[in-house]
Amino acid sequence: MLAVAAVPSKEELLKRPVIKRPYLKAVRITGEPVEHGDRILAPALGVPYGCKFWSPVVLYTTWDDHAWHLLSIVALAEDYGHPFGEFSLSTSDGLVLALMRTYPLGTFCASLSQDGGETWTHPVEVNPPALNFSRTAPAMAV
C-alpha cells in the first residue's frame, strides 16, 4: 500500500526557508501564496545585490520541496527611484497578475505574466486619478 504525503498547510509553507543567494541580499514574503500549475508562487519583497530598495519578486516552491526559490523580479525599484511596499499575486486562466504599491507614494501598479511568473510586462499605474488608495492594501479577488 502506498503512503500518501500530507499536503502542507499555509503556515507550514510560509515557514520554509528562502534560498536568496546569489541574487538577493534580503527577502520577505509579503502576501498569500497562490497555486499555479505544479508550483506554488509567493509574492515577496527582495533587495537584489547592487540595489538599495525593496523590489517585488516572485518566489516558488512545490509541494514536495522544502524551500522557496527566486523565480523572477517583477520590477526593479531602482528603475522607479523608490521602493515598493506591498505586493500580491492572483492567477486565472494560466495568467499571473501582480498588484504592487509603491512606498511612500502609495501608487498602485499592475504587471502581467503569461509564462507562470518567469517574465513580466512593464508595470503600469492603475490608480484612478480621482481616488486616493494610499491607505488600502493591495488585494485581489478572482
Image (cartoon, grey):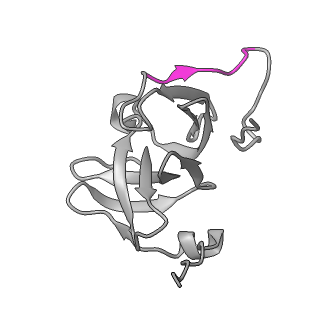
Above or below residue 20? Residue 37 is: above
**127 within the magenta span:** yes
Residue 95, given in percent of the width and then of the height, sits at 54, 30
Identify whether 136 is placed above or below 126. Answer: below
**Can residue 55 be seen from the camera position used here?**
no
- Which residue lies at the image location 57% right of the left edge and 56% below the top edge? 30
The quadrant holding residue 142 is top right
Residue 131 location, x and y as percent? 79, 21
- Image coordinates for residue 101, horizontal then vertical, percent: 59, 37
Q: Is residue 119 magenta?
A: no
Which of the 4 image quarters holds residue 79?
top left
Residue 72 visible, this angle: yes
In the image, 70 versus 79, the foreground residue is: 70
Q: Main secondary structure of the magenta part?
A: loop
Please indicate whether residue 45 sits to the left or right of residue 139 in the image. left
> Horizontal placement of 26 versus 92: left or right?
left
Residue 122 percent coordinates (x, y): 42, 21
The residue lying at 49 percent from left, 66 percent from top is 63
**Residue interval drawn in magenta:** 122-129
Q: How many marks?
A: 0
Quarter of the image for residue 88 reads top right
At a point 64% along the width and 35% down the height, the residue shown is 106
Q: Residue furthest front?
A: 1
Is residue 53 toward the left or the right of residue 105 in the image? Answer: left
Q: Nearer the viewer, residue 127 or 33?
A: 33
Nearer the observer, 107 or 115: 115
Residue found farthest to the top = 129
